[in-house]
Amino acid sequence: MAKVIAEMLVESIKLELPDVKTVRLQWPEGYDPGEFKTGQFITVYWPHKPKYKRAYSLSSSGLDRGAYEVTVKRDGKMGTSIVDWVEAGDKLFVIPPTGRFLPVFDPPGKHLICVAGGSGVTPFRGFVREATRRNLDTRITVLYSVRTTQDIIFFDEFTALEKENPRFKFHVTCTRLAPDHPWAGRRGRVTPEWVKSFIDDPAQTVFYACGTNEMVESVEHLVLHDLHLTKEQMKTEKWG
Amino acid sequence: MSSQVPSDLLYAKSHEWARLENGVATIGITDHAQHELTDIVFVELPAKGRHVKSGEACAVVESVKTASDIYSPVPGEVIETNPAVIQDPSLVNSAPYASGWFFKVRLASSEPPAELLTPQAYATQIGA
């Protein structure tokens, strides 16, 4: 079935952080995106600027019907216009979901280790939502690198999902906290040693990395060169 | 996919190229950079007459997935910008070393900065 570009109403906006918003885009009546999957991205543009397009990972899951959710950082013209100006009732054109950054839920029993930097965490919200709602036995560990504790997107939601889903774990590392900050969690960048400490059965583990090129490439190097795992066990989404 | 690294250019670690001719450097971003950025949808260039330092952020490029600063690989005065990439940013994807150039700088000194990479060194950096 042909993919149909649709004009969608901004149904609601949620302020996640001062510079990050989740936008809920309501499907128009009769809209059928066909099959789409958790982890894919949509591409959006303003009706008056059709040449200027930006792609955003869905932060909702493939089980969520009736609307798409994307979580947007104030970055570039689109990110700035969305975070600063967009309101419920505005309209955006949406190119349907595509992409291969997909959670491996089948076969069962996998451990998904998801390394995220900054707003790279957004697709993993969809992963955890789907696994939790379907009560899957898939284990998901999100390793999340942020500058400070003020930059953690979805902290409350991930904390609640951890309580609901015993197979989901959420770990944060802060890279730029002041030495006297009371944060008791991990500090510093994502290191191969830190990632390795969460692996128990390499053959059953699938790695995901979403964030800056540098972070994604370091995880890729760990998985493919140091651990000698297969390309099928390493899925990446780079954003610059 | 292997990226093109023309042998007649110099490169910055941050993925800009410079073509040096008669004391003027033409600047753009590399094939590797455009490939990593994916489809480019917006380019903002420095004003003519602006004096830039080596490594100074002076342009912006946005693709469908990210926004990035572009750094001048050489110091000097911006003497010309490329209106074609403003009109059609996809030129940066289709012809990064030709019609997709960004701006020209009249060099502040007769010698290019020593930190610029040779084609071989840049190819090594990107694993080409």
Image (spheres, grey):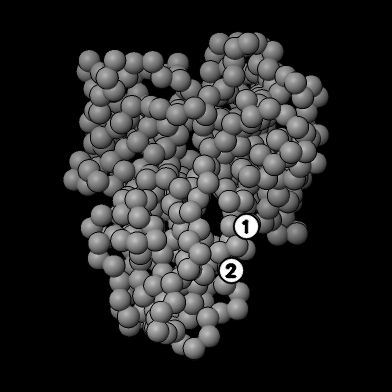
The quadrant in which residue A105 appears is top right
**Count of number-bearing discs:** 2
Q: Could you tell me which secondary element the residue under label 2 belongs to?
A: loop
* Picture residue at 71% right of the left edge, 23% below the top: A205
The quadrant in which residue B21 appears is bottom left
Residue A150 appears left or right of A63: right
Nearest the viewer among B83 and A94 is B83
Is residue A80 visible to us here? no
> Looking at the picture, how far across and down is residue A111, in whole percent?
69, 21
Q: Earlier in the sequence, mark 1 or mark 2?
A: 2
Whole-angstrom CA distance, mark 1 to mark 2, is 9 Å
Q: Chain of mark 1?
A: B
Residue A221 appears left or right of B36: right
Compared to residue A221, the image places residue B83 above or below, namely: below
The image quadrant where one finds the N terminus of chain A is top left
Cβ atoms under marks 1 and 2 closer than 8 Å? yes
Amino acid at pointer 1 = Gln
The quadrant in which residue A40 appears is top left
Circle 1 residue: B125
> Looking at the picture, how far across and down is residue B65, in whole percent?
42, 44
Q: Chain of mark 2?
A: B
Is residue A3 visible to us here? yes
Circle 2 residue: B117
Nearest the viewer among A130 and B96 is B96
